[in-house]
Image (cartoon, helix red, strand yellow):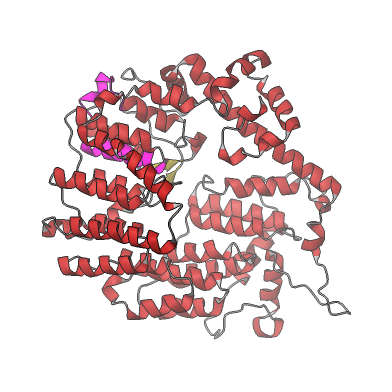
Amino acid sequence: MLQSLGSSKRWRTVHTCTHVWGRCFAQMATVCNNQEYLQFLPYVGKGSKFKTHYVNSFNSVSNSNESHDDHELRSRQQKLTNYKKISKYLSQDELFQLNQEFIQQIFSLITSFKYDPKILDPKTVQEFYRQPRVLSMAPKLPESLNIEVFTDYVNQITNNRYVHNHASNEENVIPMLLRQFFHKDNRHCMKLRGIQSYNNVIRFFLSKNDLPYAKSLLAQMRSEGIRPNRLTYNLFIGHLRNMPVHYTNPLITVLKYLGLMRKEYISPDSTTWHLLYQILPDKISKQMLLDKMDQLGFSRTTLLTRFRLESLSSSAEMMKLLESTPPTSKDINCFNILFSQLVTEKKYHKCWELLHKITPTPNLSTLNSILNSLRNNSRVDLCFLFYNYMLEKFKISPNTTTFHYLIAAAVKQGFHNNWRQVLRILYHEMSAVTGTTNNFSGYYLQRAKARSLIDLKNNQAPLNLKAPLSAAELNIRHQLFNDLSINTDTKKFPTIPNTQKHGPKFVKATLTSGYHRAKPSKNGEPKENYIQLANRAKSVKSAIQKDFKQKDRMHNLSRRYRDRISIIKEGYTSNLKQKLVDNNMVSVPYLK
């Protein structure tokens, strides 16, 4: 019975703690009695195939709806499985030779297309690689639907991520609503669906790694007389870059999709070539692809330069590549990768120097890249230093992602005298500057709240982020955002604060932010500081911390299983209508 409980990978280790499940049963009893919960447990827990039985079955996409091409894709699965088995017994040289055969077939096939100059436009590549925006509330359903309104609404809910009530998460209101919109028997929406809306939904579910449902949508659109276009195949080819597990060699799957594109007279575009560059396994094949792109007239985009930079492991190699790259093939995003690597290598002075030397002006993405790397170095003082300097020097306006990295750095800094005050100041600053507190920082704020329960120095008082700032905290805020700054006359980046070089105010501000240096003891060994003392594994701290983690696990398990039980009891559509009301999206009559 215990083995059937863990359904989420995030909590896969929970089933080892028997006492946790006993308390989980007690919490679930507040929603439904234990007998009822145990009755539904085989249908919602691990091994129940809940998604197959209750989610995918809702769509009822039968095999008869699959086209000949989709059947061909599926019929070759046995050959691919054989490749996976055979590859275990081949040496690295033999695998390399086998991959080279597939690569030569790909090159032969992709160069045989006739290319229109219009599809060589690099702007289509930037559009494909765009990142979803993070928003708070999901938009309300429109009162009436036509093709234009439906397409625009589907585009809005699939290309943005909504954090309120986890609306965009799997098995929540956005995925459920999309499955309802694109149900094969939904007559209200059948005439409204088009190639653009289908592509948006396929992109959305591929981002959730739901490849079977994305393939079923491809079969369904064919049955409705909608032909897939170039973007459709690019989405499926692009999914091969980040599949959790490659059941087969992705090169074989690329060959299949290119073959289907050839049958339907769809030429690959610049995006397809960029995706192939990411899928190819070695530097030799990648260089061969670049040479063929030059022969066909494809321009070397900045995105290709970014891919090449990401494959390098040192800042010296990155700088050498950027120096040899023409200005048209590099932008600020390329330099952001270099800045991030320099910070990772703790070359802060070199990073600071390059901010003034590069031709493209540093922007918000540059600041976020630097802060993203700095948060792992336990140097929250440097985070404030770069933050204050770049806001003043380059007139940058921070966003919620910026404060997410600052909060993460403050949490990873650990215990110090002002760790609570720093977090509260950042929380209030984020609310004042961006107008919202909904961002990715929830995980780190949760860690901070858990830490407050084992903070013996502050009597284990819970962390209250929303209370107004006191006069002492306003003084600390002035130190963090005003005193932690670099003068225009400074010639060397202040990596290590020094009173004589940087002044007493600067040093005091760094210590306030959490910076610490262990002073050597008499015998030459470093003396334990406050952070090391506070993080000692004492029995009382470990017990409180363990109890908090167990409560958090039970809360997430209970919420997940409670939602699943409600789907079984109320039905998929009724549960969706209730979630629409809970998310202030309004229930409407055109649901199935």
Task: Name the main secondary structure of what is drawn in magenta.
Answer: helix
Q: Position of residue 84 (x, y in %)?
A: 41, 47
Q: Is residue 186 magenta?
A: yes
Which of the 4 image quadrants contains residue 81?
top left
Which of the 4 image quadrants contains residue 191?
top left
Q: Position of residue 583 (x, y in %)?
A: 46, 29
Relative to 157, 5 lies left or right: right
Q: Is residue 175 visible?
A: yes
Q: Residue at x 68, y 62 (%)?
A: 476
Q: Is residue 155 visible?
A: no
**Furthest residue in direction right, as rendered:** 522
Name the image quarter holding the N terminus: top right
Q: Examine the rendered structure and indicate whether residue 551 appears above or below residue 504.
A: above
Relative to 92, 566 lies left or right: right
Q: Examine the rendered structure and indicate whether residue 507 appears above or below residue 438.
A: below
Q: Nearer the viewer, residue 35 or 3?
A: 3
Q: Position of residue 204 (x, y in %)?
A: 36, 40
Q: Which residues are magenta?
A: 182-208
Relative to 234, 57 lies left or right: right
Q: Nearer the viewer, residue 105 or 575?
A: 105
Q: Examine the rendered structure and indicate whether residue 313 appears above or below residue 180.
A: below
Q: Residue at x 20, y 39 (%)?
A: 228
Q: Position of residue 378 (x, y in %)?
A: 65, 64
Q: Residue at x 58, y 45 (%)?
A: 442
Q: Is residue 187 magenta?
A: yes
Q: Residue at x 57, y 39 (%)?
A: 9
Numbered-mark total: 0
